[in-house]
Image (tube, rainbow, N blue to C red):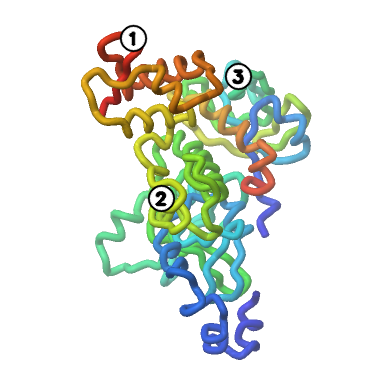
Amino acid sequence: MSSDHISTRVNSARLPDFVGKTVRLACKPIQLNGDMAIVQASDGGEVTIRAMKPDINTEDGYLEVVGNVLDATTIKMLSYTILGQDLDMKLVNDTIELIHDPRFYTRMFA
Amino acid sequence: MSQSDYYANGGGGFIQGGSPFSASGSPGGARKESSHSLRPLTIAQVIKATQAHTDAEWMVDDAEVGQVTLVGHVISIQPQATNCVYWIDDGTGRIEARHWVDSSSEEDTGKWGGIDESMCVRVTGSLKTFGQKRYVNATHIRASQDPHEIYFHILESIAVTLMIDRGPPSGSGAIGIGSTLADTNTSAYTSQSRPTATDQFSHLPPLQRSIARFILQQPSTDEGIHVAAIARAIGTAGDAQKISDALDKLMDEGLVYSTIDDSHFNIST
């Protein structure tokens, strides 16, 4: 029905499985450079964000980036949500690992 | 099933009266129970939900669902004359949430105001179809302030799905298909197999749980229970280390304390 609107929550380790698809990445910006940014995902891995919106700055804290996966380490941003300064990234990462657990992924998240 | 199919097949009267699952055929009014329950779901689960006919209960993985609660981002808001349509996206799919507007009620403005596009919201309501379209008839929508609520909701949806599969985390075995969380306590299946299936220790790992229950079952004395008696009763193949570790954990959590010496334990109630 709405299978074309799936944007799975991922960490950096799951990105290679989602090249060409839309994902949601909870992350913290480390380095902003114009429309490029380097962010840290919930599993600690670094991901390059392209087409970064210019109004984002490091003081926004954690972000959820929605975008297309270009390759295993790059996402082209479509939109974003600010998640604030206090986010338990371990909880986020544990949740993401459960989402991708074969017991739940096709049944509940895709 | 589309609406036209439904009416072409002889109307609601035939289906209601002829269904083997209605009124007389339904065991113990299970259908009524589930219609009062509230289940956290992902939108993908809602999209996968099935309904045998337009009057039937919604089913998710062979379990009836009553009300549902979702957490996701608002993609768009379309105010209409009698209702307001919110498109909700939680990353697993998209679905419409419809709120029927009562413009004369002031309470509604407070309850429904302040929802904007791109906000994260929690939607509570029941599943409906209109033609081929599936939507949530929302009884409540509120903004979700804490970003953790998104992750909480995912984890809660997983936990509830597992509990419906397996029964509550007491190891009391499978509950009847179609039982909901609300009625597991009173279900004929669980009450027979283990009366203490859902007590205050249900959340503990199995070994700690059996130790806590064993101590609780013993006659209450000041000196408590000797560790050897616990080991005999639990009988984990004489693995004293495991029992000792479990007792340490129970003490850390304040559920059990040592009494006259390091070998006697009692339960804090």
Tag 1 residue: B262
Helix or strand or loop: what does disc 3 sit on?
strand
Q: Marks 3 and 2: CB-CB under 8 Å?
A: no
Q: On residue B115, which mark appears?
A: 2
Cα–Cα span, label 3 and label 1: 58 Å
Residue at x-position 34% and y-position 28%: B215
Q: Circle 2 marks a residue in which chain?
A: B
Disc 3 is attached to a residue of which chain? A
In the rendered structure, find residue B102 and report the number of the disc placed on it.
none
Residue shown at 61%/72% (left/top)? B52
The amino acid beneath tag 1 is Asp
Residue B167 x %, y %? 51, 47
Q: Is residue B243 above or below residue B219?
A: above
Element marked by disc 1: loop
In this image, B1 relative to B123: left or right? right
Residue designated by label 3:
A32
Quadrant of residue B112 in the image? Answer: bottom left
- Residue B79, above or below B208: below
Q: Secondary structure at mark 2?
A: loop
Residue nearest the observer in this picture, B158 or A90? B158
Asked if residue B78 can be seen in this view, the reply is no
Q: In the rendering, at what x and y percent does residue B214 appear?
A: 38, 31
Position of residue B4 relative to residue A12, above or below, is below
The answer to which of marks 2 and 1 sits earlier in the sequence is 2
